[in-house]
Amino acid sequence: MPPIITSLLDTDLYKFTMWQAMLHRHPQTQAHYEFVCRSTPEYPLAELLPEVEAELDALCRLSFARDELAYLSSLRFIKSDFIDFLRIFRFQRAFIEARAEGDNLTIVANGPQVHVMGFEIYVLAIVNELYFRRFDAQAALREGRARLEQKVGRLKALAAGTQRRHPFEMFDFGVRRRFSGPWQREVVQRFASEAPQWFKGTSNVLLARDLRLVPIGTMAHEYLQSYQALGVRLRDFQNAALEDWVQEYRGDLGIALTDTVGMNAFLKDFDLYFAKLFDGLRHDSGDPFEWGEKALAHYRRLRIDTHGKRLVFSDGLNLDRALQLYERFADRVQLGFGIGTQLTNDMGLTPLNIVMKLTHANGQPVAKISDSPGKTLCTDETYLAYLRQVFDIPDPGPVSH
């Protein structure tokens, strides 16, 4: 079979936007990323090791083709010197290791951040596709297509629904946990052709190019987490990360991620300056209805018209939950809904809950303190306790490692 990843555009847009920002502002940063499976798979992931090794070998032989660089260059926020860097870039196999530890699959990427930060999405897509190849593909595709038909039908029915102040807008965020690359393409193509009024883009840069869709994405937790180890006072890391983002993109890519140390701590830093400069906020943990009300209340306190701002929801969404959130908020603020697993891996099989997260930068631990306790990620309990103290965050109990 051909390799799973055949184009370096087959990843999320925000990997490129964070990559460019770090290359320009902190190119010397060293980083350590670890693969984690948070769920119990149907069979040990360690069994996939030989296939994972072969896929990583193939990934590290890829480089950016001329037409791929031309597409990236067409995005107005991508700078010419970043394109020059990508022109000569190739993943280094020495910077990533996969091994079996009992039944568990361990994958670690370690090296200069601008050389290892890109591994994440490819690794997750590779592990997912290899894992699901062992199930009955034809049965999964039959069920997946039946469920897709229902989703498309529900979106089409929206056209006859009650008109709200702001439209329903949905995006595909499903690269990392997709059933397969071809299935993600089929899903996105179907939504784009049959429900274009509501389906507005994809995080997958390759599909955005091929299907002439808007590529969607700004920043992820790793960008903000990196600033915990970049020499600024820890209490100021969010301010430093947001300020560098503003200076890098000068008004583009204006959706800020709120839950690196929780929504409450984020809003203390998201003052009038940032609230005016950023177009809106992205939810990725905790109760989405509570989060939305907090965001709107914050804008009101700052006397900012919420109709000019956008809230993007992206935490474990399905279409039902997205429509419920739309009903709650559509008359008060612009909205966007990034749906991942429930678009690209809704096949009647139990999806894997896998991540590959930044755990150290410049030899120091970094952490995400999520508003959903099970999504908190840190390998150093002492540092995590210190981070909680600095941001006055109560300890909810056990942490995911």
Image (cartoon, grey):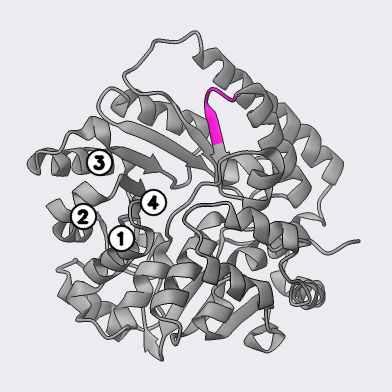
Residue 49, given in percent of the width and then of the height, sits at 76, 76
Label 2, label 3: how many angstroms apart (C-alpha)?
A: 21 Å
Q: Position of residue 389 (x, y in %)?
A: 16, 75
Spatial separation of the CA atoms under disc 4 and disc 3: 27 Å
* Picture disc at residue 290: 3
Instruction: Say whether residue 274 is left or right of residue 112.
Output: left
Nearest to N terminus: mark 1 or mark 4 = 1
Residue in the picture at 50% in, 34% down:
170
In this view, the residue in front, 306 or 53, is 306
Q: Element under label 2?
A: helix
- Name the residue type under label 3: Glu
Which secondary structure lies at badge 1?
Answer: helix
Residue pictured at 32% horizontal, 83% vertical: 230
**Label 2 close to label 3 by CB (< 8 Å):** no
Kind of element beneath mark 4: loop
Say which quarter of the image contains residue 40. bottom right
